[in-house]
Image (cartoon, rainbow, N blue to C red):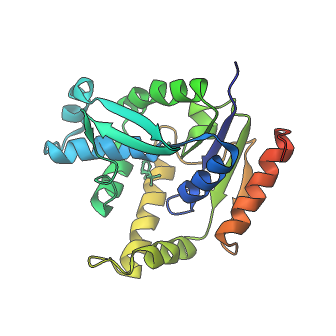
């Protein structure tokens, strides 16, 4: 049976994951966060003190990554250990952006992403889902917001935590990652020609979810 595939791409902090999670639970689809795959490779490199690209490429066959979906929530394991929570640090965010520019790494993760999409109805979020991983996706959304707005949302999320970075640090990090992700030679972050652009700078979370859900239902002729 043909599965339904929805791609949501966009820059860091645009709200892709929380929005995709909400919408996929509404539709009963699996939500696949592909950034977690790059983060897990960055974690592997950090754990093994790998600093050179060649060293990381040489070790690729030792990197076993498994995704599971428990109650619609993605868990990710690295060589048998659940690392879902360990990959959410600023160092790993930057490390993921770096490893994601390595062509061999993108190739390594490509089949896994396509396999999941062929087996399940998915909402898959990332940077190159509509352009490279699922060029024939049933619907493509490009979700963005200004860097100031994305930084301020992330700051609000983190500000109660003891080791919260400053707003300026978060903003700088976002701008650096935007630059890396959209200037790399392979599969750079960009809007697919047939993607629908949603700029959420002046929109609330539920407003964005409602708009995307309406687009999905209309385009894919899904019933309410
Ligand atoms: O979505 P995220 O912030 O968790 O992603 C971490 C990094 O991984 C991001 O800076 C770029 C990279 N990435 C990518 O290159 N392609 C994807 N499909 C998903 C993420």
Numbered disc total: 0
| Residue 38 appears left or right of 133 | left
Which of the 4 quarters of the picture holds residue 51? top left
- Residue at the left extreme of this rendering: 49
Residue 10 in the image: state x and y as whole percent.
58, 54
- Residue drawn at 53 percent across, 28 percent down: 116
- Residue drawn at 45 percent across, 74 percent down: 157
Q: Is residue 135 visible?
A: yes
Name the residue nearer the viewer: 190 or 141.
Answer: 141
Q: Which quarter of the image is occupied by the N terminus?
A: top right
Residue 97 in the image: state x and y as whole percent.
38, 50
| Residue 59 appears left or right of 172 | left
Q: With respect to residue 123, does 80 lie above or below?
A: above
| Residue 167 appears left or right of 24 | left
- Residue drawn at 64 percent across, 42 percent down: 7
Which of the 4 quarters of the picture holds residue 223? top right
């Amino acid at each position: 049976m043909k599965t339904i595939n929805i791609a949501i791409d966009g820059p860091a902090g645009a709200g892709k994951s929380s929005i995709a999670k909400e919408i996929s639970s509404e539709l009963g689809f699996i939500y696949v966060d592909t950034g977690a795959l790059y983060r897990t490779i960055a974690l592997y490199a950090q754990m093994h003190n790998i600093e050179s690209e060649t060293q990381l490429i040489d070790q690729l066959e030792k990197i076993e990554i498994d995704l599971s979906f428990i109650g619609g929530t993605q868990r990710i394991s690295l060589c048998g250990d659940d690392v879902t929570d360990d990959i959410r640090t600023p160092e790993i965010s930057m490390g993921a952006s770096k490893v994601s520019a390595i062509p061999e790494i993108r190739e390594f993760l490509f089949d896994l992403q396509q396999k999941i999409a062929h087996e399940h109805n998915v909402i898959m979020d990332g940077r190159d889902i509509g352009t490279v991983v699922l060029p024939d996706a049933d619907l493509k959304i490009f979700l963005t917001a200004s860097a100031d707005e994305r930084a301020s949302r992330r700051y609000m999320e983190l500000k109660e935590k003891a080791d919260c970075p400053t707003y300026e640090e978060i903003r700088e990090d976002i701008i650096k990652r935007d630059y890396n992700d959209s200037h790399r030679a392979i599969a750079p972050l960009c809007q697919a020609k047939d993607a629908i652009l949603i700029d959420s700078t002046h929109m609330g979370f539920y407003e964005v979810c409602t708009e995307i859900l309406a687009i999905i239902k209309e385009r894919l002729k899904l019933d309410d």
